[in-house]
């Protein structure tokens, strides 16, 4: 993780020509933002209509489109945030409808309630290890929550498949290596700023489940830029989410309604049914060995066609949408399995590179800045670091890779570890690297360059437990995003009488957040839930978000999809401290034990004695009465939906670091309890409970994520857990134990795994 000093940034420390974001009324540092007090009032009855959303902010949008304006690219408005909230409510309603539909895909509640039939236990499901500590009733509630999560997981896997079909139905023109050498070409260097708008209409809106996946895809900005650029889908990139149409399509009861013409257009263009639940229960696949097509069940966890017995004994399953896909091809007898799908994707992309000069995923954008780049000094040179993986495959590995899967031959059981081994043979050989980079033999000390390592790492990250055509596993990303959706729906700002002031407040708070980000380019910063809503809304117009962040910070700021829970906690403390230093206000207006502990940790014994600013802030939050309006279960808490656990730690040093962080947090919590007691207050207990599909589970920290105890059932990667089994190729990471997804992830190099990688500048989390 990058370091930062403890002083507010001086003008010299800020980017050139940088000024704090402002509104027409003046700079942020001179103006306090209104309190959330009114927001915490009891909401009106659910029958009260939602606020009338009018998209009449032409002045703000005009500023955002003017390159000469300081707010160029900043198009976050009240109406867009409100429409975004409506979409989140609609997604949550869809999720609950799916999860609570008894018997969906043959998965019945009775398998838990009567104790017969489906056995849900599995050593791969985290909480089964703690099952003996539960009462019989609690055990059934926990199992029911897993059952409902499984239904939703299959639905999301099918939604990603439908999004892929919609994506492939567009006018695709694949990016080529020649495109990447043209200085002013629209397909590469000028791609982020070209303006080919997608003609959104009510009649071409996709189904809600597909819109949900697109929403998540855009919330991984660098991944979305890479994918749209590689497939030539500039119109998706330049247009973003059509908020006015979304607002019109979602009614006040959060049902999604589009004209019949939209349904017929979808069926005609995509060739798929409108309703996810009415699609076939089998997925048509092509056997990688013999190329024959076959139909694999989406899940084997439900009852069979006769309804008499279950095909699998657990919730892991062996269907295409399950956690352990397995199918034997009836034509060639080849075993098709989950890891083989990733290898097949790698071979497909290799074939595109060899036959059509389509660059491999992960080799397209500058790994530090997330922007297109060409070798300006020598366009014809053969040692440009970012494109090293493409050269390696074309010149050294083409035959070995293409022979991995062959009918009756090839590798007996290829996985991405097999590919990793082939790459290690090259990256660990200085002579091989010199040859690929066309370096004279007498330069014996020449080795793999830094950006060559990063690009190789990023390329490999596109395949670990990801067999979709996209830069990341969108099923896992949707599941992680779901925790943010759930929290925003529980806040229910849409039914608040002060919803518009709330939107204005969080937009201004987001601008302050961006100012801190710009002032500390080497430090991870963490949003609160209110800031995150504005941040997400900005990202959902990708081109605008790109323009703003590149201008202010000289790089395309990413949204780190996975980050180690400990790193998140440390970064949140830093963000809280800097926000209070700059603006003299509490950052996380929440009274849960964790937020209270973080605020208290910034107040030393001497600070209390001398009544410093941090001490006064912490006290005024309570004495003013604001704290009473910010209950732990319904406040702008730290946003931590992307926090994950890592199975492997690179070294004893890192393990000790994490242990020290946990110990320090516990010590600060005890200090905070004592300080609160002296003031006649009780700090909330740590054993607060949250609800997951009706099951109350213990939330041990801000990063508590319920899918930790339902791991193993998902068709892609486990959304809340990063294992150590799939390391990067040796020679491309500081340690061979860097976990899959943790390094070179969709947005660049993050310190997600807590190992020897360094967070790149402005590699922030959301």
Image (spheres, grey):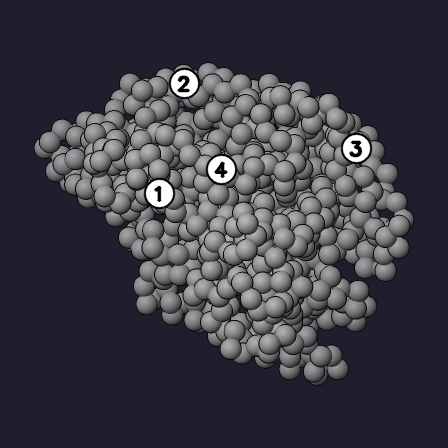
Upstream in the sequence, badge 3 or badge 4? 3
- Disc 1 + disc 3, Cβ < 8 Å: no
Choose top left, top right, bottom left or bottom right for residue 352.
top left
On the picture, is 57 further left or further right than 691? right
Figure quadrant of the N terminus = bottom left
Q: Which residue position holds label 4?
A: 283
Query: Mark 1 against mark 3, which lies toward the viewer?
Result: 1
Q: Position of residue 23 (x, y in %)?
A: 74, 38
Q: Nearer the viewer, residue 695 or 622?
A: 695
CA neighbours of label 1 inside 10 A, class few (<14), some (14 to 19), many (20+)? some
Residue at x 61%, y 44% (from the top left corner): 514
- Disc 1 + disc 4, Cβ < 8 Å: no
On the picture, is 369 further left or further right than 669? left
Residue at x 29%, y 23% (from the top left corner): 354
Judged from the image, the secondary structure of the residue bearing numbered disc 2 is helix
Q: Position of residue 282 (x, y in %)?
A: 51, 39
Q: Which residue position holds label 1?
A: 328
What distance separates the C-alpha of mark 2 from that of mark 1?
A: 41 Å
Q: Which mark is residue 179?
A: 2
Upstream in the sequence, badge 1 or badge 4? 4
- Residue sitting farthest toward the left: 442
Choose top left, top right, bottom left or bottom right for residue 367.
top left
Q: Which mark is residue 248?
A: 3
Q: Nearer the viewer, residue 494 or 320?
A: 320
Query: Mark 3 against mark 4, which lies toward the viewer?
Result: 4
């Amino acid at each position: 993780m990058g370091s930062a000093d403890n002083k507010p940034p001086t003008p010299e420390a800020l980017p050139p020509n940088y000024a704090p974001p402002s509104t027409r009324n003046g700079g942020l540092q001179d103006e306090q933002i209104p309190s959330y007090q009114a927001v915490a009032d009891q909401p009106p009855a659910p029958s009260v209509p939602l606020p009338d959303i009018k998209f009449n902010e032409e002045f703000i949008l005009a500023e955002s489109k003017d390159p000469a304006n300081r707010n160029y690219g900043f198009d976050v408005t009240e109406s867009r945030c409100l429409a975004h909230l409506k979409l989140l409510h609609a997604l949550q309603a869809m999720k609950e409808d799916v999860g609570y539909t008894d018997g969906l895909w043959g998965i019945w509640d009775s398998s838990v309630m009567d104790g017969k039939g489906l056995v849900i236990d599995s050593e791969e499901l985290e909480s089964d290890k703690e099952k003996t500590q539960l009462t019989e009733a609690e055990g059934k509630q926990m199992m029911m929550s897993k059952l409902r999560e499984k239904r939703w997981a299959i639905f999301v896997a099918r939604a990603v498949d439908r999004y892929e079909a919609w994506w492939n139905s567009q006018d695709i023109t694949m990016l080529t290596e020649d495109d990447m050498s043209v200085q002013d070409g629209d397909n590469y260097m000028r791609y982020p700023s070209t303006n080919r708008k997608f003609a959104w209409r009510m009649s071409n809106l996709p189904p809600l489940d597909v819109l949900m996946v697109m929403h998540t895809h855009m919330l991984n900005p660098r991944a979305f830029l890479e994918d749209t650029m590689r497939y030539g889908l500039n119109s998706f990139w330049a247009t973003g989410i059509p908020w006015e149409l979304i607002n019109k399509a979602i009614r006040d009861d959060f049902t999604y309604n589009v004209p019949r013409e939209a349904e017929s257009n979808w069926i005609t263009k995509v060739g798929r049914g409108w309703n996810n639940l009415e699609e076939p229960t089998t997925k048509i696949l092509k056997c990688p060995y013999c190329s024959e097509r076959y139909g694999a069940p989406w899940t084997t966890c439900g009852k069979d066609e006769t309804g008499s017995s279950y095909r699998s004994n657990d919730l892991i399953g062996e269907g295409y949408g399950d956690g352990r896909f397995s199918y034997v091809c009836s034509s060639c007898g080849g075993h098709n399995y989950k890891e083989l799908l990733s290898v097949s994707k790698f071979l497909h992309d290799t074939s595109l590179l060899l036959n059509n000069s389509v660059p491999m995923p992960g080799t397209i954008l500058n790994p530090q800045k997330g922007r297109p780049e060409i070798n300006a000094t020598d366009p014809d040179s053969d040692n440009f670091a970012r494109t090293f993986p493409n050269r390696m495959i074309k010149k050294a590995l083409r035959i070995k890779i293409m022979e991995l899967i062959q009918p009756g031959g090839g590798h007996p059981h290829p996985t991405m570890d097999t590919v990793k081994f082939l790459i290690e043979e090259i990256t660990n050989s200085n002579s091989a690297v010199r040859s690929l980079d066309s370096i004279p033999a007498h330069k014996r000390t020449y080795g793999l360059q830094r950006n060559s390592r990063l690009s190789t790492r990023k390329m490999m990250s596109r395949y670990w437990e990801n067999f979709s055509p996209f830069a990341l596993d969108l099923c896992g990303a949707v599941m992680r995003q779901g925790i943010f959706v759930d929290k925003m729906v529980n806040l229910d700002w849409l039914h608040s009488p002060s919803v518009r002031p709330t939107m204005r407040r969080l937009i201004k708070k987001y601008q302050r957040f961006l100012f801190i980000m710009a002032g500390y380019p080497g430090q991870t910063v963490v949003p609160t839930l209110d800031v995150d809503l504005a941040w997400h809304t900005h990202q959902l117009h990708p081109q605008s978000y790109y323009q703003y962040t590149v201008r202010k910070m000289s790089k395309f700021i990413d949204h780190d999809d996975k980050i180690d829970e400990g790193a998140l906690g440390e970064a949140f403390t830093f963000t809280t401290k800097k926000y209070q230093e700059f603006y003299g206000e509490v950052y996380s207006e929440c009274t849960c034990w964790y937020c209270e502990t973080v605020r208290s940790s910034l107040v030393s014994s001497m600070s209390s004695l001398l009544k410093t600013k941090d001490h006064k802030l912490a006290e005024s939050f309570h004495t003013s009465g604001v704290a009473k309006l910010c209950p732990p279960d319904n406040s702008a808490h730290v946003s931590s939906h992307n926090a994950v656990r890592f199975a492997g730690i690179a070294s004893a040093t890192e393990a000790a670091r994490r242990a020290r962080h946990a110990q320090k947090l516990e010590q600060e919590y005890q200090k905070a309890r004592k300080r609160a007691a002296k003031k006649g207050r009780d700090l909330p207990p740590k054993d607060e409970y949250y609800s997951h599909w009706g099951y109350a589970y213990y939330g041990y920290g801000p990063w508590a994520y319920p899918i930790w105890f339902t791991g193993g059932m998902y068709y892609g990667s486990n959304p809340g857990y990063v294992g150590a089994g799939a390391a990067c190729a040796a020679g491309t990471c500081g340690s061979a134990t860097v976990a899959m997804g943790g390094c070179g992830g969709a947005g660049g190099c993050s310190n997600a795994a807590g190992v020897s990688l360094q967070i790149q500048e402005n590699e922030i989390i959301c």
